[in-house]
Amino acid sequence: MTQANLVGVSPAGPAPAAESFPWAAMAILVFAHFVVDSLVSMLSPLLPLLREKFQLSLSQAGLLVTTLSLSNAFAQPLTAVVVDRWPRLPWLVVGLGGSAFAMTAIGWAPSYTLVGVAVLFGGCMAGLCHPDMSLRASNLSQRYKGLAVSAFVTGGRLGFSFGPLVAIGVAGTFGMEWLWVYALIAVGAALAVRWGLPDPPAAVQIGAGGPSLLRGLQASLREAGLPLVILTGITFCRAMVNINLMGFLPTLYVERGLGLWQGGTANAILLFFGGLGVMLGGVLADRIGMRTIVVTAQVLSFLSLSAFLASPPGLGMAILAAVGISMYLMMGVGIAYAQEMMPNNRGFASSMMLGVAWGMASFSVYPISKVAEQVGLHSAFWILPGFLVVSFLLSLLLPRKAAPARQASRG
């Protein structure tokens, strides 16, 4: 494989100008990602209501956030292995249905234990969806791969933005028990995937049987080498910030004397502008390079997050737009970068960014919530900019080009 193959250009020259962007298929994939992540995001704004319903401490509420993040994240690398090997099985349809049932069940579950079980299952089902979706996105268009991956990721950010508003709107108007109505949207998305998306490409044949499959994955990981480790470390640091912001932003606003709607709106602002940040990063990366976007994102994130924490709640609501753009600027770029490092295991590469890094970052929620019980959530959040300092230092270690691209160019 030549370096040209990695970026979607044929050895003979650029891709033919006749290739057009697959708008219809992309719209379905964006919608599916929107639905999956909107379901996952419903837990956060409902935490104040769940705390009141079951008399939960802040750390017990944090345990639900941790459970959801861990199950969603660690399911991804496990399911990515089988998705890469058998990409044409209906993983996405199953994941959509399972996550819709489980995540809407938190509204009517009669006990804290059953809410925890629903969150665990819902996270696993959402984790099943992501490798399938990212694999399809990276294969929709060779010429517009960066745009396709960024659009796919943006659908998820918009879902995270919209989900809290749906949860608060339904819970405030009808009661949490009626969240199941949103599952009908997921059924529509599953039908669109089943009948509207082209089949993903067949798996790369690396031999029959599990051992050969694992050897192929091990070889891809060795090819990616240290740059993939560094990129995962950067994503891990940023995920610690994102998970705690998404998990506790509504609670933070309630603690600071504002209402549940203001807290949900804060989450919506963060994630809506996060979606714009993903698209902006994808467009700029094609012009100035992925590494430049990664380094720049660390600096802008640190500055905007520090400004948010130093501001009163009203002004902080406006600054959240800058936090969202900067915190998600490199998200799609990071996935595309990892997939270039592992071109034969693209589902697994995306799971390293969306699964492994975010799963490890989930372990930060419980200790930060315990600190918050002692000093207050706002004071505890001043820990978060420190993670961005570490991610900035790591970003300076990234090479100019991915290691597999250099090795492939010798072939």
Image: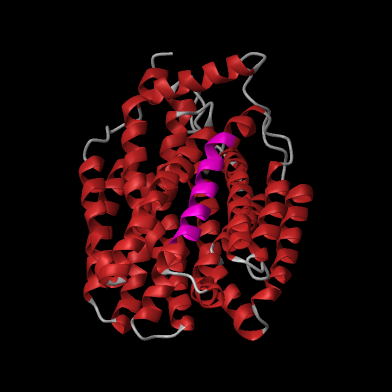
Residue 71 among those drawn in magenta: yes
For the residue pair 347 and 373, the one nearer the viewer reads as 373
In the figure, residue 4 lies in which quadrant?
A: top left
Camera-nearest residue between 227 and 30? 227
Q: Does residue 220 appear to the left or right of 19 in the view shown?
A: left
The color scheme shown is secondary structure
Q: Is residue 268 found inside the magenta-colored segment of the image?
A: no
The residue closer to the viewer here, 25 or 361, is 361
What residue lies at 38% left-to-right and 57% top-to-bottom?
365
Tell me which segment is drawn in magenta.
Answer: 62-78
Determine the main secondary structure of the stretch shown in magenta.
helix
Visible in this render: residue 285?
Answer: yes
Would residue 19 be visible to someone looking at this image?
no
Residue 54, placed above or below residue 130 = below
x%, y% of residue 194? 77, 48
**Based on the displayed image, in which of its 4 quarters is residue 314 positioned?**
bottom left
Percent x, y of residue 69: 49, 52
In the displayed structure, 252 sits above or below 396; it is: below
**Picture coordinates of residue 252 (x, y %)?**
37, 74
Whether residue 132 is situated above or below residue 168 in the rendered picture? above
Quarter of the image that includes the C terminus? top left
